[in-house]
Image (cartoon, rainbow, N blue to C red):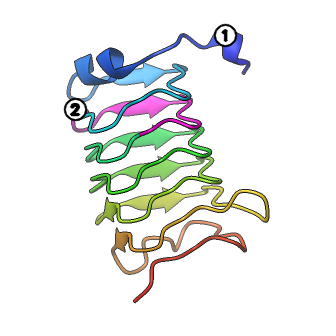
Amino acid sequence: MSTAEEPTGGRQELVAATYGQQLRRISFAGADLTSVRAAKHLGLDRCSFAGADLRHATLEQVFFKMCDLRGADLRAASLRGVRFAACDLRGADLRGADLHGASFGRVNTGDDTGRTLLTGARLDPGALDDATVEPGTALPSD
């Protein structure tokens, strides 16, 4: 999937989405989405949030399927009940994010060049059981 094939999205597209709606193959790469509030049960399929600023965003019960979140800034975001399925989270910053009830299925969390930061994130015990946590991932401290 090349970026030329992806429609470009922004704050309006994300905020205008309704409960249970599916957004597919939209690029929010590099977008300023600070403090954005998305509808619950929003489905995001093959969307790119690479390098997007999602600090303090409310993305509760959103389903990310095969999304690119490399380098996304999700610090202090409310991600309660979010599901990540087959997503790329390398280099994503989730420090201080609320991830209670979140699930991580077959996600890529990092390697030596782009580690995912989860320090201070609030996760349920076992939330990362289905994730492949690569060396270099900064996990929450107890």
Q: Tell me, for residue 39, which label it has, or none.
A: 2
The spot of residue 112 in percent (x, y) is 79, 65
- Residue displayed at 49% across by 21% down: 24
Check the picture and name the quadrant holding the N terminus: top right
Image: 107 above or below 47: below
Q: What's the distance in space between the residues labelled 2 and 1, CA to CA?
A: 25 Å
Q: Is residue 51 magenta?
A: yes
Secondary structure mostly seen in the magenta stretch? loop
Q: Residue at label 1?
A: 5
Give the quadrant of residue 138. Answer: bottom right
> Under tag 1, what secondary structure?
helix
Magenta segment: 38-53
Q: What amino acid type is highlighted by mark number 1?
A: Glu
Q: Which residue lies furthest to the right in this view?
A: 112
> What amino acid is labelled 2 in the image?
Ala
What label does residue 125 carry, if any?
Answer: none
Q: Is residue 83 left or right of residue 107?
A: left
Crowd band around label 2 with a 10 angstrom C-alpha radius: few (<14), some (14–19), many (20+)? some
Tell me whether circle 2 and circle 1 mark residues in contact (CB < 8 Å): no
Rendered location of residue 80, percent (x, y): 27, 56
Q: Does the magenta stretch include residue 120?
A: no
Q: What element carries label 2?
A: loop
